[in-house]
Image: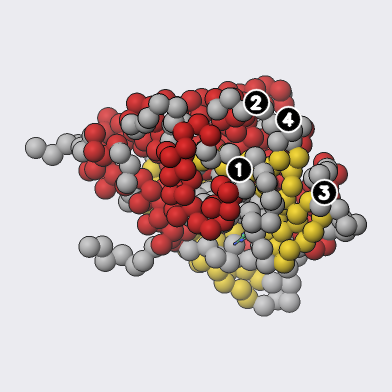
Amino acid sequence: MSNLPSEPEFEQAYKGLENSSLFEKNPEYKTALKVVSIPERVIQFRVVWEDDNGVLQVNNGYRVQYNSALGPYKGGLRFHPTVNLSILKFLGFEQIFKNALTGLNMGGGKGGADFEPKGKSDNEIRRFCDSFMRELCKHIGAETDVPAGDIGVGGREVGYLFGTYKRQRNKWEGMVTGKGGNWGGSLIRPEATGYGLVYYVEQMLKYAGKGNFSGKRVAISGSGNVAQYAALKCIELGATVVSLSDSKGSLIAEGDAGFKPEDVEAIADIKLARQPLTAYEHKGAFKYIEGARPWVHVGKVDVALPSATQNEVSEDEAKTLVSNGCLFIAEGSNMGCTQEAIDVFEAERKEKGGEAIWYAPGKASNCGGVAVSGLEMAQNSQRISWTREEVDERLKLIMKEAFENGLNTAKEYVEAKEGELPSLVAGSNIAGFVKVVQAMHDQGDWWESM
Ligand code: NDP
């Protein structure tokens, strides 16, 4: 029995791993799970800043330095009023294994603050970032811990955070990724999570014998960084994107046309100005449904890409997607599906063989963002910049390998009947976990008891 406070999001992520068939075959890994589930270090700090009216404001700042077996801690910073330790622990825990799946040398971490960026002026954002980094800079660095963006932290915030670190530590170093292209950022980093997600699904389509994105109908949730670039890549590859959403509601395409690149670009501008989707003047091309997520409103789709936030597909929504014939669901968001939704998808996959829905967990399908962050670290340490094409090729290869790693591990560890598609959730969980805990074992972090 734990005496820790209840941490529902973290417990959900932990149970997702604990129920793995790996522990039946390799019981010694149960000890490793006990060790790996406790962060190496949690830093919690006060962030005091002044708003435009000269009034003092205060927030909670955090950094969870979860695991450094494979490299410096690596994972994003989230600025959102809902941020708490349970959410950051679940994100950090998932990040450890996601980073392992990229094949690059990165440990896992996550951080952020319960700060609401919406409605804040640029000056307020700058003052908040400055105060946040004045404390965080004591604990991070290019060889120690390299944060990146996440919800509420984009290129502008990364710039302010980098500037304060440099001034405080008197060091220009790649201690954060997602930097501006003209001062150390990697090309394709802003696009990487969304593009990588689509490259991952291309592998699923190919393996399942369902062709490519051309002619497919795709439902996407969210309208931030991940959703925008996933949508643009789907459109480029000939698919029809039928939905985008935000925390207030969903835009659903009317008729067969779907979103055009110019729609997505206009929505990106609206989101940069922190406005809701209702600010988009779409002239009747879309239906806006207030307070709704897209899944039960999109009708028949081939592919669903949850790309907003955690637990954004419920059991009932999962059942509707299945009954509407959706065949592929891959998470752009972290833990986008509830456990009950995953159970629906996995039960269908087992029951109906190759003709049922196939689910990919975020730790595999959205690892493209952190992978290009890893490539940004590599470029920074060599003081070079690769071309767009070079980074894109590497990203494609990493997504292919992340897919194959999960697939082949599932074939090795999980019993399946003839014609059944391998469980990407089981395979990816096991592949990431085994890589990390083997390194921890080599480094003396855990051992088999006599
Ligand atoms: P952004 O802040 O750019 O966009 C987030 C989007 O999700 C917005 O449309 C936002 O709506 C919506 N959203 C946020 N919270 C909620 C909520 N509680 N309910 C419904 N909608 C919500 O974030 P990103 O696109 O960067 O991140 C999206 C997801 O992808 C997150 O789960 C993140 O952890 C994950 N991810 C991101 C990576 C990256 O490289 N950026 C890498 C890997 C995973 P609104 O505008 O109204 O706030």
Residue 328 position by quadrant: top right
Q: How far apart are marks 2 and 4 (CA)?
A: 8 Å
Residue 211's disc number: 2
Q: Which residue is drawn at 36% across and 45% down?
A: 17
Q: Mark 1 points at which residue?
A: 326
Residue type for callout 2: Gly
Determine whether the residue tagged by mark 4 lies in a helix, strand or loop.
Answer: loop
Q: Mark 4 points at which residue?
A: 214
In terms of secondary structure, where does tag 2 sit?
Answer: loop
The residue positioned farthest toward the left in the image shown? 450
Dot 4 surroundings within 10 Å: few (below 14), some, or many (20 or more)? few
Tell me the CA gap for discs 3 and 4: 18 Å
Front residue (pair 41, 269): 269
> x, y percentage for residue 266?
84, 50
Marks 3 & 2, CB-CB < 8 Å contact: no
**Mark 2–mark 4 contact, CB under 8 Å?**
yes
Name which of mark 2 and mark 1 comes first in the sequence.
Answer: 2
Query: Upstream in the sequence, badge 3 or badge 4?
Result: 4
**Residue 56 appears anywhere in the view:** yes
Quadrant assignment for the C terminus: top left
Quarter of the rendering occupied by the N terminus: bottom left
Q: Residues within 10 Å of mark 1 (few under 14, many from 20)?
A: many
Marks 3 and 4 close (CB-CB < 8 Å)? no
Q: Tell me where residue 11 appears, x and y as whole percent.
A: 37, 57
Which numbered circle lies on residue 255?
A: 3
> Between tags 3 and 4, which lies in front?
3
**Mark 4 or 1, nearer chain start:** 4
Q: What element carries label 1?
A: loop
Estimate the x, y position of residue 393 in percent, counting from the top left. 65, 22
At label 1, which amino acid type do we have?
Cys
Q: For this rendering, which residue is in front, 16 or 72? A: 16
**Frontmost residue, 312 versus 152:** 312
